[in-house]
Amino acid sequence: MDFIRDPKAIEIKSMELIEELLGEHSFSQEEKTIAKRMIHAAGDPELGSLIRFHPQAVDQGIMALKQGAPIFTDVKMAAVGINSRVAGYFGSTVNCVIGEPFIAEEAKEAGITRAMAAFRHWGPRLDGSIVAIGNAPTALFELLRLHEEEGITPALVVGVPVGFVGAAESKEALVDSPLLYITVKGRKGGSPLAASAVNALLYMCHPDR
């Protein structure tokens, strides 16, 4: 069977096909680069009509990463998917505590999800950070609460939780908030999308990419 074996050639061909499938859009060049990586991660060209960017999201996200802003994720899948080597070049760390025993204890005591407990635990450390949420709508709702009640303001929120309960609503609330965002309308989303968007920003920053 004849098929492409070279990893770089596969990526280039994939991006060419995505470009064709994307069709007409209103993305800036940088937004399109991010959107294509998200579509590639999901294998779903229909995302092109659902991805939304705050007008300042890309510029502020790149600026924060260049300054070594920490990256916080809701689940390990998103954390593992982010290129920690490239993030480390700028001094950024990728953080996820959802699997820590103390988070499980705090969640049980408060009667909330572990994802909510993780973001409540981080609190002010989220200020000026990059937040990537790909799984838990409750994490996004908690982040919005922290902003509204405590003034905690990340530099950028990649908010793409997936699912049928609260996912679409949490993303609508994000778009309606003052926070800068990259998101996907409706139920679609997932940790691969969150990681791919952050990676796209990192690659825009890195001199060797």
Image (cartoon, grey):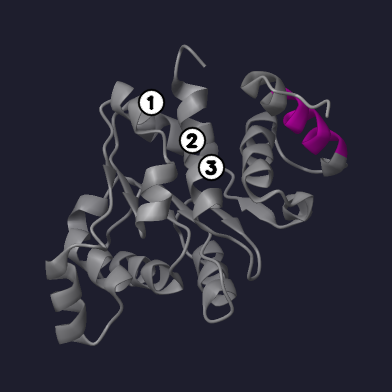
Numbered label attached to residue 197: 3
**Quadrant hosting residue 84:** top left
Marks 1 and 3, how far apart in space?
14 Å
Residue type, mark 3 in image: Ala
Seen in the picture, residue 89 relative to 73 is either above or below; the reply is: above
Compared to residue 148, the image places residue 208 above or below, namely above
Query: At 18% from the left edge and 69% from the top edge, which residue is drawn?
Result: 103
Tell me if label 1 and label 2 are in contact, CB under 8 Å: yes
Q: Nearer the viewer, residue 144 or 104?
A: 104
Could you tell me which residue is drawn at 77 percent across and 26 percent down?
Answer: 13
Q: Residue 116 sits in which quadrant?
A: bottom left
Crowding at dot 2, Cα within 10 Å, few <14 / some 14-19 / many 20+, comes out as many
Circle 2 residue: 199
Q: Looking at the picture, how far across and down is residue 183, in whole percent?
A: 57, 56
Q: What residue occupies the far top of the structure in this picture?
A: 208
* SS under mark 2: helix
Residue 115 in percent (x, y) is at: 32, 69
- Magenta span covers which residues? 12-20
Image coordinates for residue 74, horizontal then vertical, percent: 36, 60
Query: What is the three-letter code of the residue carrying label 1?
Result: Val
Label 1 secondary element: helix
Q: List the residue tagged with mark 1.
A: 86
Q: Mark 1 vs mark 2: which is more N-terminal?
A: 1
- Work out which residue is located at the far front of the displayed protein and give it: 1
Residue type of the residue flagged with mark 2: Asn
Q: Quadrant of the N terminus?
A: top right
In the image, is 29 to the left or to the right of 183? right
Question: Does 50 sit left or right of 140 as displayed?
Answer: right
Q: In this orientation, does residue 131 appear?
A: no
